[in-house]
Amino acid sequence: MVKVKESSGKAKRPLIVMKFGGTSVGSPERMQGVAEILEKHIRDADVVAVVSAMGGATDMLIRAATQASQGMEEPWKGSRQELARRHREVADKLLSAAEQAVVLPRLAEQVKHFEDLCSGFTLLREITPRGMDTLSSLGEVMSATLVSSILRSRGMKSEAVDAVECIVTDDNFGNASPLFDETTAKTRQRLGPLLKDGVIPVVTGFRGATREGVCTTLGRGGSDFSATILGAALDADEVWIWTDVDGVMTADPRLVPEARILPEISYREAIELSYFGAKVLHPRTIQPVMHKKIPVWIKNSFNPSCPGTKIVPAAKNGQAGVKAITSVKDAVLITMNGRNSVSFPQLAARVFNCLHLENVSTLMVTQSSADNVLCFAIHQADLARVKTELEKAFELEMLHDYVGGLEVMRNIAIVVTVGENMKGTPGISGRAFGALGRKGINIIAIAQGSSELSISFAIKSSDMKEAVQAIHEEFQL
Ligand code: ADP
Ligand code: ASP
Ligand code: MG
């Protein structure tokens, strides 16, 4: 636990933002575990809790909304029952009678809100992005209501806070970005007095609101991001992300069962790993805390005594070479050939402008300037939009065969080796090539950032698991 000293020399209670993910609040037993963790840590620190929806709830809400917008009523009515049942079960098992009297009507209201929204979508046969954000983040509203009430049932002071009252975002519904100055002011105004009174705020993860107060979401898995946004706004001493694994591991444990916990990684390594698919962290988690250099811990709510992984501005010089491997499964490679008609810089400028217009980022870029060929990888989910945009932009050239048609290679995986200390360590690509070659895995493209923080390999999706295991073994991670 961090110890913070005031200028008077007196020890000040540190402030920690603790985020609990979907599995950590996934059942009455897990929610009780959360309460025990908080009970322990509030002895020495002020704590702001941030909660995800109960595991699986967000998927269910999104499915229900989609079915409603297709005019199907039965499926979302089934989801309504399930939503009510799961949250009711927690209330029945863990809340005091007095808390039940207050909270059960609140949960009923939230379920009614779900019903009203889904009825609207069914009637209109459509769902708008803002409607989807309000509905898909309802699970967080329900879990924050419950966790806070459990804490009060156990004698702690706590209040559920809807993040729409704290986090101000742009209006990019579904993947909104925080407006930091306004968020800082609102968060301090809303949470400051609670902390001063010894109240534990339990804030909804995942959601925020535009300046006009319309609910937005921060992208799937966004509660990690919520925690660091609030941590930065409150100048917290640390942010702790409680999840279902012991920390950031050398590889996704579902792909490599022997993966090992990394006790410490740098901000840059964490950003690189999460950008390339390590689900343990939302890709934008580190961004809010970078300037303030606030450490972020990944800890296991199923195994709270394990110290976990500390993510710090710059990790101590550890082993040379590769530190971890990550992978993105559902990628596509797109190749554009400018032939003799479009110069390479013009080709690149126009292609990237299309990506910019669709707000799509690339996973990998390679070029062959002499042949006027540009090749890049994106997530499969972005393909349709990008393809339409490129076909529009190059319509004339394609019609007259001045540029080669779009070549799309589907079912691609990008495997990425990450490590600050790969820089200056020769032979890493060679060893990875060798390891893949021995398994007969063909490398379709390779890219290395000039920062030498990561090396990416594009391969067939069907080879991904074997490739990650082979590289993990080669570097004895
Ligand atoms: P939460 O619901 O707590 O946010 P997530 O499911 O989003 O949890 O993230 C945790 C999961 O991330 C782990 O269960 C693990 O399967 C997966 N994961 C992928 N890559 C890694 C990695 N390198 N280290 C640890 N976990 C990883
Ligand atoms: N509940 C949201 C999701 O499933 C946010 C999160 O869990 O971080 O995407
Ligand atoms: Mg997550």
Image: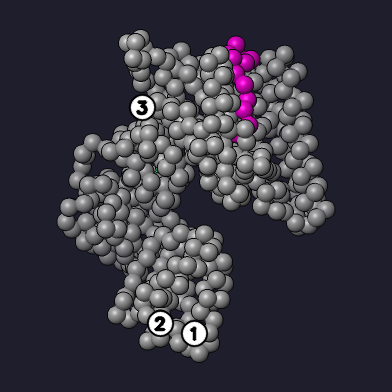
Q: Which residues are magenta?
A: 152-163
Ligand 2 closer than 8 Å to label 1 CB:
no
Q: Which residue is mark 2?
A: 342
The vertical placement of 147 against 337, above or below, is above
Q: Which residue is mark 3?
A: 307
Which of 166 and 429 lies nearest the eye of the viewer?
Answer: 166
Circle 3 SS class:
loop
Which of 227 and 396 lies nearest the eye of the viewer?
Answer: 396
- Does any portion of residue 247 appear in the rendered image? no
Tell me which amino acid carries mark 1: Glu
Ligand 1 closer than 8 Å to label 3 CB:
no
Residue 473 lies left or right of residue 32; in this view the side is left
| Of the image marks 3 and 1, the number of the one nearer the N terminus | 3
Determine which quarter of the picture holds residue 465: bottom left
Q: Give residue 20's position: percent from left, percent from top.
A: 52, 31
Tell me which amino acid carries mark 2: Val
Determine which quarter of the picture holds residue 94: top right
State how far apart marks 3 and 2 are (Cα): 55 Å
For the point 78% across and 36% down, which residue is it?
Answer: 112
Quadrant of the frame with the N terminus: top left
Mark 1 residue crowding within 10 angstroms, few (<14) / some (14–19) / many (20+): some
Q: Is residue 174 magenta?
A: no
Which of 295 and 242 lies nearest the eye of the viewer?
Answer: 295
The vertical placement of 325 against 17, above or below, is below
Q: Give residue 352's position: percent from left, percent from top.
A: 44, 67
For the point 75% across and 35% down, which residue is it?
Answer: 111
The vertical placement of 153 against 129, above or below, is above
Q: Which residue is mark 1?
A: 397
Quadrant of the frame with the C terminus: top left
- Does any portion of residue 201 appear in the rendered image? yes
